[in-house]
Amino acid sequence: MTVIGDILRNPEVGWRRYDCMPSHSFLFEMNGFTVNDTYKNYYFGSTKDSYLRFKFLGKKLRVIAEVSSGPGNVSISIDGGEKEYFSLYKDLKGGLQEYTFLFEKQLSKWEIHEVIIKIESTTGHSHRFNAFDIDAQGEFLTFPKKGEELKEPESGWNRFDNTDRRIKYTGNWEEIHNDSRYHNGTGIYKNTTHGTEPVICEFSFNGTGLRIISRNYDGSGSYKAPIAITIDGVTETYSLIGSKVLWQALVYEKLKLEPGIHQIRIEALENVIDAIDVFGGELQLSDLIKKPKVSLYEKESGKIFVDDFDSINPKWLMSPSNEFNNAAKKGFLRMNHSADKDVMLLIDKPQGNFAIQVIADYAPTKEGDEGGLLIYQNEKNKVEFLESYSVNSSQRIKEWMAICKEDQWDFYTKTDTFFDYMDNDSLDAKRIGVVLKRGTVEGFAPLDIDKIIITTSNMLRLRQLYENYKIVLKDTADNILSTNIVAAAHTGIDILLPSLEFEGIIEIYDEENELLAKKQTTFYGGDMYCMGSSLQIKMNNDELNTTDPTNLGYMVDNERIVKMTIVNDNIGAATNIKLSIQQYMEKVGYTWALISLEGTNYLNEIQIDSIAAQSTRDFWVKVVKDTNFLTFEPIYFNIHLKHN
């Protein structure tokens, strides 16, 4: 096994070597280093603060260099992190030892990494680097600088022309065609001759890096004003002014973005767009970028009770019990006919308004064979909604539904996608369930119950909307089941679900028919979903309770540090996020709580510029108890979360 200090003349299996040869010098930015033609494969550095800077695509790195009896302390920094150190000194009798393995780093992500190696101390000695080893599938990358030509995208980058339909332009832009100086012969521009109104370029991409390819100017004419670029709500500026006029120049670069979808807005009085380079991803469809996107998050659940009869729930009352069998058909509860008694499956009626749905396999083929929903007060007072033999019916799977509002009952049966209204009745019921009517005539069919669902209603409630918004309900195959419009002066709408438990998709469109929010999940009748942010705070993969305390565990040495995670389930980024401890026990000398982004520097409030769509960010909470205050009372505090 190779260890630090060994001679390593060739890369090991799983590694790829880049020798420090003159032909590779274009891969490095050098200060105080030169290429030595005599040795052919060294870079020299003989003054303090000499450095090499390079980039590679991968997740591991080794440094191979020459050691000697002369001093030479070296620092290495990766991705702007803290410096690590190694030495080029070794007590050698022979004077020099080439190809010495001196440093190794295993990184957490496969991405572009930037490395800076510095000579920290020297006494006039030359320091020679032989090679750098990276992943076998990795690659050293050139070091394009802002304001220099970049006619082809680098490895790992994808280039998209300015004409890509996923890029949206607003304002008085002028198009360029058949000009070979631009990528694909096309570009788009706006200068002061086209008016004083700013122009806007918008797009969305999935990846971790962004480059803008444009034309570069020397400052003698137009295009001097700064260009504002906003990434996920955070704004920076860049310029098209450089030392000389160039086409297909790199004018802006942003690396180390969080994985996920990022939304970009570029606004300027004058601008030129030639192409967009994206690292590790591609541009997204335009319906994701036209307006800030939000999510639909569940505010209230309508689910009361669901039983799929994989086992017998003790809440059920079964009479007579010997006519029930859950082994005859896997995942079903079978009800068999009794000769002299109705067979009943009952459960206590929920409080308030509700809906019940029964899904059963039941196809009577004889007159007198009947079964269905049962609304039960006592033996003398009950309402039955029964299925019976019909010459015209060939459907085996039966679905019945009853909706209760106070003591009024409406009954439905499903014949296609949605339920059809059938009948109504009135009863102050105590229990609800299923009945199979008495009789054991040959050919009477058993009633196999697949599932019973009880919810607060048969409607899905959508809130925090605007009038004239369009709500589209789809199944998981993307088939449209219904389209609904929010009424004037309303901020919400109730839409009919095809089933009390329905796996499907809700899409919300504004008045211009632009998609604002989308949610695919299992919906229950009575669920309330609000349009807005679905940022969650989780601990150990479970969301913190928003109403009841969450147990943080026990203190050790009067201190407790808990790691938590912000989860952004939006289809757009969340920006300007602020976290703080809103309140805690106010007894003097009792307890204090602080919050930290990295687990070391604790503050009253922390701020996160942006969390990309479908991404997370960790933070830490520290709770400390005064050792002089003895109590067994729990510690209460709230985490306050706000964002754009």
Image (cartoon, helix red, strand yellow):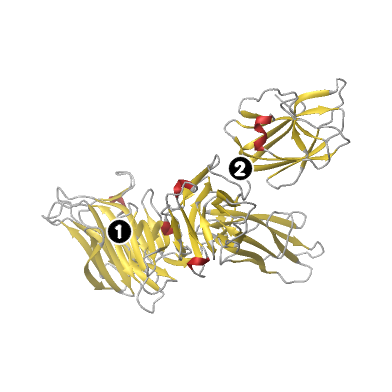
Question: Where is residue 10 shown, x and y percent of the image?
Answer: 67, 23
Label at residue 572: none
Residue visible at 60% across and 28% down in the picture: 14
Q: Is 493 drawn above or below residue 94 in the view shown?
A: below
Outermost residue to the bottom: 489
Quarter of the image containing the N terminus? top right
Image position of 554 (left or right of 524): right
Image position of 81 (left or right of 508): right
Quarter of the rendering containing residue 514: bottom left
Q: Which residue is mark 2?
A: 112
Does residue 548 show up? yes
Quarter of the rendering containing residue 574: bottom right
Which element is circle 1 on? strand
Label 1 is placed on what type of residue? Answer: Ile
Label at residue 480: 1
Quarter of the rendering containing residue 230: bottom right
Earlier along the polypeptide chain: callout 1 or callout 2?
2
Q: Residues within 10 Å of mark 2 (few under 14, many from 20)?
A: many
Which element is circle 2 on? strand
Q: Residues within 10 Å of mark 1 (few under 14, many from 20)?
A: few
Image position of 371 (left or right of 153): left
